[in-house]
Amino acid sequence: MRIFACGAAAALSMVVFSGKAYGQNAPAEVLDASWIAVCAGAQPGSTFFDRCQEIINAGPGSGDRRSAAAVGNNLGVVGAQGRRATRDDERADSAAVRRDFGAWSLLANARLGDRDRDSSDFENGFSEDVRAFDFGLDYRINDRWVVGGLATFENADADFDGQAGELDADSWSVTALVSGAFENGWWMQGYLGHRNLEFDSTRNIAYRLTVNAGTPDEATFDVADLATGSTDGDQLLAGISFGRTIARNAWTLTPQLALDFADTDIDGYAEQSGNGLAQRFADQGVESLILGAGVQVARAVSTDFGVLQPFGRLGWQHEFDNDARELTSTFVGDANGTTLAYATQSPDRNFGDVTIGLTAVFGNGRSLFLAYRYLLGHEFLDDGQLQLGGRFEF
């Protein structure tokens, strides 16, 4: 039975105007309401046309006719690209403590992270492993100012909940750093950087439909395939922080404020394969502006081999930007190019973090540090990061 009957006109007019399916709703809701519109552009003989025939003609048992296919397209994985690029737990850092042994200083960090994101109607949840390496060099201009640079490589592998897909993200960044030390323990740090982003995504398309419901010919069949895509992006990073180190005997107390900005652009791309259900996604833009406040407590302990300084830090962060965004896409096989528009998850505006660590300072300008940071009270993220680094001054 051919589809696109005249009775579809009313539903079509509700969701489409000038070739766009509007909505600030979740991806599955928008797609479920738009099947008739997008399938109007399916060309007979194409794989997309075959999928449309199956979806439009599906009967009871298919999740209120077509919602099973909408949910099974897993469009909620797309928002993770922007989410991945604006991690809440990253900012440029000069790593181990500088002890002013020499004018030049080399530093290296290794970061290992584990992040879990809860699923919502707007974005698929995921579990992610992160590996990052930082290498830097800085120079002390005088007793007050230090300038330097930091190069970072990061790789992250995310597996989406319910086998909805995978995302592999690589990035390279270069960051310029400056720090200043002033009277009475006051200090400031600033950074400006650029990051190149690379994404390889896999979207699992899986759903079950029922045909000829309530008749002797009733049957179910499954659609299962993978749509793959690759894209690039770039990110501008900037931030500044102020604080004061208050020393009392072997103890130090350091209250601080920080402001971090990230402007991210991700190129649009078209998926491959997908058994007729591949999509073409538009460019994405994400901006994040986070105000952070915290206090660190540390104590110096002298030993025969150097000075050990255990420390703890408690912080709070507020996100001013990174609002829920509208993502747009079209089916590659849709000759009419009907655009689907759907929303991402709103951010958690306020959350905290706690860090515990140990710095070891040795002779000849050498130091090592180990720290673990964990997000507190975040609405939908469970995030921890282990960091190991060292510095050598000369």
Image (cartoon, helix red, strand yellow):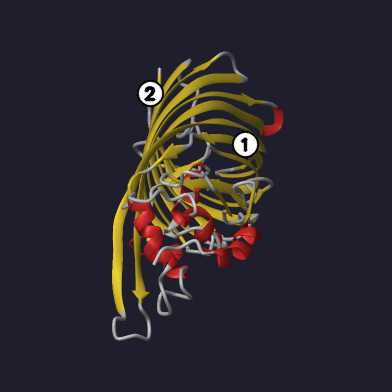
Number of labelled discs? Answer: 2
Q: Quadrant of residue 168?
A: top left
What is the crowding at mark 2: few (fewer than 14 residues within 10 Å), some, or many (at least 20)? few
Q: Residue 45: where, in percent of width, then height?
A: 33, 50
Residue 365 vs 328, above or below: the answer is above
154, 112: nearer the viewer: 154
- Residue visible at 49% across and 46% down? 330
Three-letter code, disc 1? Phe
Marks 1 and 2 sit apart, C-alpha to C-alpha, by: 36 Å
Three-letter code, disc 2? Asn
392, 168: nearer the viewer: 168
Asked whether the viewer can see residue 373, the reply is: yes
Q: Is residue 186 left or right of residue 52?
A: right
Q: Secondary structure at mark 1?
A: strand
387, 142: nearer the viewer: 387
- Residue visible at 45% across and 42% down? 280
Q: Secondary structure at mark 2?
A: loop
Q: Is residue 392 left or right of residue 11?
A: left
- The reply to whether discs 1 and 2 touch (Cβ–Cβ < 8 Å) is no
Chain-order first, disc 1 or disc 2:
1
Residue beneath disc 2: 364
Q: Quadrant of residue 209?
A: bottom left
Judge depth for marks 1 and 2 and give the one in front.
1
Q: Residue 238: where, in percent of width, then height?
A: 60, 30
Asked whether the viewer can see residue 199, the reply is: no
Q: Residue 18: where, in percent of width, then height?
A: 64, 46
- Residue visible at 53% across and 61% down? 380
- Residue visible at 55% across and 54% down? 353
Q: Residue 175: where, in percent of width, then height?
A: 50, 25
What is the crowding at mark 1: few (fewer than 14 residues within 10 Å), some, or many (at least 20)? many
Residue beneath disc 1: 261
61, 154: nearer the viewer: 61
